[in-house]
């Protein structure tokens, strides 16, 4: 029962992570057409993303680590759960090392954008697209882990 609980939390939080990443990816083409002033104002839309993302990503990491420990003796479930966990960790590293420095720079943009704001905007969105790819791979691995174990139990 405990495995099912942690798997639920892992899958649920990974789905939320994928949703956050998808929202960034869907915004990219529209925001790329914004003039500087409109882009500056659009950044206020992300006021709660950091807090929500931090809670969700931490929960995904912790619950998936718990699942990995609980299924460690079941080879296919362990390997697929490990893939999911690696994706979550790499997503965090992409945010920490590549996105957050841009975020910290963008916070200073109150009245005027720097001359390289378009390059920063595009890098920011590109790294979020990378996170979406990682979330998709990780979520797929976690779902496949559950499905393979379910199929084995049915035989």
Image (spheres, helix red, strand yellow):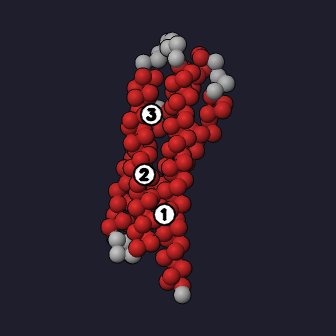
Horizontal and vertical percent position of residue 16: 50, 51
Q: CA distance from mark 1 to mark 2?
A: 11 Å
The residue carrying pointer 2 sits among few (fewer than 14), some (14 to 19) or many (20 or more) residues within 10 Å by Cα, namely many
Contact between labelled residues 2 and 3, with CB atoms less than 8 Å apart: no
Horizontal and vertical percent position of residue 142: 48, 63
Q: CA distance from mark 3 to mark 1?
A: 25 Å
**102 lies left or right of 35:** left
Residue at horizontal 62 percent and vertical 35 percent from the top? 27
Instruction: Say if 58 sits above or below 94 in the image.
Output: below
Residue at horizontal 51 percent and vertical 24 percent from the top? 120
The residue carrying pointer 3 sits among few (fewer than 14), some (14 to 19) or many (20 or more) residues within 10 Å by Cα, namely some
**Residue 4 visible, this orientation:** no
**32 lies left or right of 53:** right
Q: Earlier in the sequence, mark 3 or mark 1?
A: 3
In the rendered view of the protein, which quadrant contains the N terminus? bottom left
Please tell me the numbered disc located at residue 33.
none
Residue bearing mark 2: 88
Horizontal and vertical percent position of residue 143: 52, 65
Residue at horizontal 35 percent and vertical 60 percent from the top? 65
Please tell me the numbered disc located at residue 142.
1
User: Which type of secondary structure does the marked residue at label 1 adopt?
Assistant: helix
**Residue 124 visible, this orientation:** yes
Q: Of 70 and 137, which appears nearest the observer?
A: 137
User: Which type of secondary structure does the marked residue at label 3 adopt?
Assistant: helix
User: Which type of secondary structure does the marked residue at label 2 adopt?
Assistant: helix
In the rendered view of the protein, which quadrant contains the C terminus? bottom right
Horizontal and vertical percent position of residue 147: 53, 72
Residue bearing mark 3: 99
Instruction: Say if 30 sits above or below 19 in the image.
Output: above
């Amino acid at each position: 029962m405990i495995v099912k609980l942690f798997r639920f939390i892992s899958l649920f939080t990974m789905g939320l992570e994928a949703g956050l990443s998808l929202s960034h990816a869907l915004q990219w083409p529209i925001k790329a057409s914004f003039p500087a002033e409109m882009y500056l104002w659009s950044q206020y839309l992300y006021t709660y993303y950091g807090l929500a993302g931090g809670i969700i990503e931490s929960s995904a990491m912790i619950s998936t680590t718990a699942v990995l420990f609980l299924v460690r003796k079941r080879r296919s479930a362990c390997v697929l759960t490990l893939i999911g966990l690696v994706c979550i960790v790499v997503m965090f590293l992409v945010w920490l090392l590549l996105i957050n420095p841009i975020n910290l720079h963008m916070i200073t943009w109150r009245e005027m954008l720097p001359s390289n704001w378009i390059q920063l905007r595009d890098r920011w969105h590109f790294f979020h697209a990378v996170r979406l790819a990682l979330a998709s791979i990780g979520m797929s691995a976690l779902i496949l882990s559950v499905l393979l174990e379910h199929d084995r139990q049915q035989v």
